[in-house]
Amino acid sequence: MTTLEIKDLSKAFGGLQAVHHFSCTAVSGQIHALIGPNGAGKSTIFNLICGVIKPDSGQVLLDGEDLVGLPPHKITARGIARTFQNVRLFKNMSVRDNIVVALHATRNQGIIPAIASAGRDSSSMRELHNKADAVLEIVGLPHRAEALAKNLPYGEQKRVELARALGCPAKALLLDEPTTGMNPTESVEMMQTIHAVKDRGIAILLVEHNMRVVMDISDVVTVMSFGEVICAGTPQHVCQDEKVIEAYLGEKR
Ligand SMILES: Nc1ncnc2c1ncn2[C@@H]1O[C@H](COP(=O)(O)OP(=O)(O)O)[C@@H](O)[C@H]1O
Ligand SMILES: [Mg+2]
């Protein structure tokens, strides 16, 4: 059982209060969606959790231990996995090798030693292959292990990215707009994949623009606007909330 508790997090960029006293909790076996208009502070929250930027105040507690101040690779090693909005695969490497490199990188703290040492030790290499195949199974792509990453359709590349993020001993997974740019079929497959990850007991924090995806898949939704939480609860609860409707209508205008 994992609990990722974000407590009273604040971050200003110069005069701009990007995140203001933000709190939310993601637990194992739940999908917690983080939504809000553009510029609300969602990606900043992810960067704060991962240690890419440091908060001005507040805590990020993973199973009670504060991660604030740790460098990003240590936060990954503690079990926080993330994906990015854009695809970041090695296009000319096989799907399996993409994951093997990531596994190596989390072990050796950096991608350069991972590439330099890949293939040197055959027994540990076999172990990494097996681990890579295990995460490919979770994302429903075991038959793609040998394919070159660049030859996969976009939706599958995004799922390989997710598999790669899971290569670290993930307790919590942060997904930033995982269905952006996908067609409806790819979105459904991505949602099934996210469900499969959740069923492994991983706590999921999901930033997503597509409200259909949010409504279908989330157990809990936190809505933010201008860095602050304006509403939190079940998908049904938040979509009827006046402040939420106002924030979204405001964006359209
Ligand atoms: N590194 C940064 N430096 C200055 N301002 C930033 C930085 N990162 C984000 N911001 C600003 O903080 C606010 C929140 O941005 P962001 O977290 O990317 O929003 P969202 O992901 O919800 O669209 C925006 O006004 C954005 O311009
Ligand atoms: Mg963003």
Image (cartoon, rainbow, N blue to C red):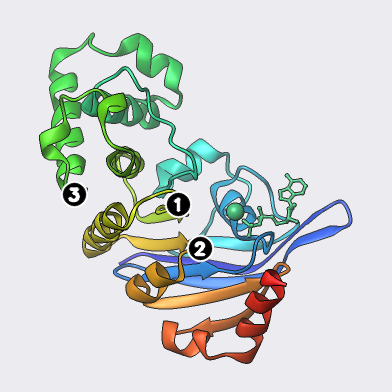
Kindly tell me whether residue 21 is visible in this rendering: no
Amino acid at dot 1:
Thr
- From what the image shows, is residue 163 above or below residue 130? below
Disc 2 crowd rating (10 Å Cα; few below 14, some 14-19, many 20+) is: some
Q: Which residue is mark 3?
A: 138
Which numbered disc, 1 or 3, marks the residue that appears first in the sequence?
A: 3
Q: Residue at x 30, y 67 (%)?
A: 1
Nearer mark to the viewer, of 2 and 3:
2
Quadrant assignment, res 27: bottom left
**Of residues 44 and 190, the one drawn nearer to the viewer in this rendering:** 190
Mark 2 sits near ligand 2, with its Cβ under 8 Å away: no
Q: Which residue is mark 2?
A: 209
- From what the image shows, is residue 233 above or below residue 56? below
- From what the image shows, is residue 124 above or below residue 56? above
Tell me: 225 left or right of 219: right
The residues bearing labels 1 and 2 have C-alpha atoms spaced at a distance of 8 Å
The residues bearing labels 1 and 3 have C-alpha atoms spaced at a distance of 21 Å
**Of residues 171 and 94, the one drawn nearer to the viewer in this rendering:** 94
Q: Which residue is mark 1?
A: 180
Mark 2, secondary structure of its residue:
loop
